Image: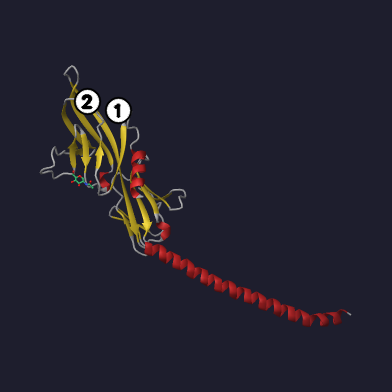
Amino acid sequence: MFCLLLLMLLLLCVRGAFQTDPVLLFVCGRRGGNVTLPCQSELREITALSFERTSGNIPLCETEEGCSGRARKRGTCDVLITDLIFSDAGRYSALIYHRDDESELQRVMRTYHLQVHEERLAEAGRPLELEVLLAGADQVQHQDESGSERKQIWRRNTRIQKDGVEIRDERLIISSFTAADAGEYTVLEDDGEMLISVSVRASEETLKEAGNKITILHKVLGNYARAATDLVHWSLSYNFKSTNRKLPADGITED
Ligand SMILES: *[C@@H]1O[C@H](CO)[C@@H](O)[C@H](O)[C@H]1NC(C)=O
């Protein structure tokens, strides 16, 4: 099920894949997993590959051995990022230096937008901490499991915030999780592009508890309903009796 979802996400993510340069290629990966940023190159004779983000150059390992970083060169000019973390989300560029047919040195640039996805289980009554308020995050939206409209629950530099939601150390914390907090949390950049998405499901216990609460509520309501019906019956019969008693009297005064 999750694989299918991820596959669908991947298909959605790898947009613009087969257009001509320059193109922003959308790629997504799972937190803790690996992702490949494909250079999709028919280029031969690649002489150098430089990989960077706005924060600076990212060293690439050429081989597995002794690789301490999380970015590796794969194949001719693909880049593999391992063990994805939320803060990997964002923009990257790769500069590929190669020799063309005339043996001239050329430079080609590839740009990527990496999205990081996670699936999570949460328990009722416990805090749910989403470590997603990274430097590039502009807003967080929540869509519940019924697939209703996305609601903004946090926005940088404004006070839009949901009740029961706290902000601490780049974390968005739902103080006490309920089944209604399940669904999809998406973190967007200021240009509206998605950086992170977290799908939160309520744990089995949470659902069972919610089910129990509904059963209890039904019982309570059932009891109220019975009590109310009894009251109505009682007051009707009381009124009926009293009216019955009053009728002859009224009749008498009217005569
Ligand atoms: C990610 O890539 C590294 C390096 O190639 C490999 O050791 C690891 O098993 C991969 N992890 C997954 C989840 O595929």
Amino acid type shown at disc 2:
Leu
Which residue corresponds to the image point at 21% horizontal and 30% vertical from the top-left?
95
Q: Residues within 10 Å of mark 2 (few under 14, many from 20)?
A: some
Disc 1 residue type (three-letter): Pro
Residue, far right: 255
- Would residue 124 be seen by someone viewing this image from the given angle? no
Vertical position of residue 164 compared to residue 199: above or below: below
Label 1: which residue? 22
| Residue in the image at 28% along x and 36% along y | 112
Nearer to us in this view, 42 or 239: 42
Residue at the extreme left of the image, as rendered: 66
Residue wearing tag 2? 43
Q: Is residue 58 above or below residue 200?
A: above
Q: Position of residue 188 (x, y in %)?
A: 35, 44
Q: Quadrant of residue 63?
A: top left
Q: Nearer the viewer, mark 2 or mark 1?
A: 2
Tell me the quarter of the picture where residue 253 sits: bottom right
SS under mark 2: loop
**Would you say residue 41 is visible in this rendering?**
yes
Secondary-structure class at tag 1: loop
10 or 143: nearer the viewer: 10
Task: Check disc 1: other Cα within 10 Å, few if <14, some if 14-19, many if 20+.
Answer: few
Mark 2 CB near ligand 1 (8 Å cut): no
Tell me, yes or no, whether the two marked residues, 2 and 1, touch with CB atoms within 8 Å: no
